[in-house]
Amino acid sequence: MDDSAWWQRGAIYQIYPRSFFDSNGDGIGDLDGIRRKLGHLVELGVDAAWISPFFPSPMADFGYDVADYCGVDPLFGTLADFDALIAEAHRLGLRIILDFVPNHTSDQHPWFLESRQGRESAKRDWYIWRDPAPDGGPPNNWMSNFGGSAWAFDAASGQYYYHAFLREQPDLNWRNPAVQDAMMEALRFWLERGVDGFRVDVIWHLVKDALFRDNPPNPGYGPGQPDINRFQQIRSTDQPEVFDIIARMRATLAAYGDRVLIGEIYLPVERLVAYYGERLEGVHLPFNFQLIAASWHARGLDEMIDEYERAIPEGGWPNWVLGNHDQKRIAGRLGAAQARVAAMLLLTLRGTPTIYYGDELGLPNVPVPPELAQDPWEKNEPGLGVGRDPARAPMRWNDSPRAGFTTGTPWLPIGPQPELNVATEAADPRSMLALHRRLLALRRAHPALAVGGYERIEAEGDLLAYRRREGGEVLTVVLNLSAREESLDLPAPAGGWRCLVSTGLDREGPEPAGPLRLRPDEGVVLAEG
Ligand code: NOJ
């Protein structure tokens, strides 16, 4: 049909392993749990699972503090469990994408333990050590993403080490070729085991200013904001030398064929697209988080989509994300009705969609009382609303008190609205789950949606409209972003409009002549004739 890659045609599903399915009753999800629930991904109609970290870790940041890049934490199982998981996924036609965390290790990683032995340690230069400022304080003003200075003092050697996240997550020195070599080995370890790609954690952080100059103040910073907002991160992140490193990762993957490299990047669109690489030797997909940050207004969204489409370099492939384990859930941000419209947007825009586990059920943000808080960021900067626990609540498999997630005590509360679960929604032909299955099936059936071009349709008010076109096929998407009825006077094609799907899952077939009518919070995908 076309020469697109699997990661262009397909949809990605993010699994936060602690919260997906607990196979051994300890209240925490695990690899065997994921393997046993792969059928859900197949029925949903996604093509790949990205699994957040499951490597050996003290869990200071729930696995984003890696103590061994080539293993499985006992909490999540064993390497044999991983091998069984990937074998079963491949048997089912699913790809497996791992979470590679190269910017920092755990402070318990043997490399860091050796590095902190002293200034003469052979691994001293594997991390970022600096002398104190003349006043004895931190070497510069760089802040930790999780609050406070990003520099931790090591009294034994009289130097500071840099940690962009927790002090338990020291940053590696990627300017050191030995670090690069070791990390490429880690990639090859998993590539040899058959993984289909990597999502690379905070990839734009890997290289820092060689002179360690201060970051400039952020004029938008004000009280009530987290510390990381105090300064613009222009010296501590997004340095030009990062692109050679990414190209090296990409080349490492290329030796194994059709694997995908995805970068986690929170940057404005003009900087974001630089990560495709000047000659497309960068990441295949620089994660595009604009739908997370955007305010939900049709006129802003159409501009944003256009601007992104224009910014992508020739040969680059777009992608869209509505949520992840660091952000508030979409149903909580927009409400249940608009979350359905958002799902239709995500799954009909041009580019690879990533679905965050549970969003296909419309899961809410689950309130977590302070005494049950788990997220280290929330604990460091309480009360600012930065906590990530509400979006990390257990997946719901049924409406029992523990949601079929565990037989033990779940590590985070299950939360309200027990009717939002796989079993109940699978039995309801108009559920959020049914909508996701329908839209994903439509993407697979219609190349116009999977790989077709994007054309904006000028609309007014709260309507967002666009065409997707491939070969002779043209599909039209109209979304009502308001809770009022809206209509769009769009010239009908010769044979009239035929509705393929509505967000209500209750409108199909030929449309009446005249303007297109959209009910409150409704979106439709229309075919011609
Ligand atoms: C981004 C990850 O998504 C987040 O969960 C983590 O805390 C930081 N990187 C640090 O690894």
Image (spheres, rainbow, N blue to C red):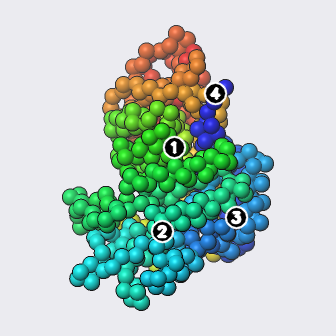
Q: What residue type is labelled 1?
A: Glu
**The disc label shown at residue 172, or none:** 2
Q: Nearer the observer, disc 2 or disc 4? A: 2
* Farthest top residue in view: 494
- Which residue is disc 3 drawn over? 31
Judge left or right: residue 234 versus residue 105: left
Residue 349 pos. (x, y %): 50, 35
Q: Which amino acid does label 2 sit on?
A: Leu
Instruction: Label 4: state its secondary structure.
Output: loop
Instruction: Label 3: state its secondary structure.
Output: helix
- Which residue is disc 1 drawn over? 281
Judge left or right: residue 309 versus residue 90: left
Looking at the image, do the residues carrying marks 4 and 1 touch, with CB atoms under 8 Å apart? no
Q: Which amino acid does label 4 sit on?
A: Asp
Whole-angstrom CA distance, mark 1 to mark 2, is 23 Å
Residue 338 pos. (x, y %): 45, 44
Q: Nearer the observer, disc 3 or disc 2? A: 2
Q: Earlier in the sequence, mark 3 or mark 2?
A: 3
Whole-angstrom CA distance, mark 1 to mark 3, is 32 Å
Whole-angstrom CA distance, mark 3 to mark 2, is 28 Å
**The disc label shown at residue 2, or none:** 4
Q: Nearer the observer, disc 1 or disc 3? A: 1
**Total marks drawn?**
4
Mark 1 Cα-neighbour bin, 10 Å: few <14, some 14–19, many ≥20: some
Mark 4 Cα-neighbour bin, 10 Å: few <14, some 14–19, many ≥20: few
Is disc 2's CB within 8 Å of ligand 1? no
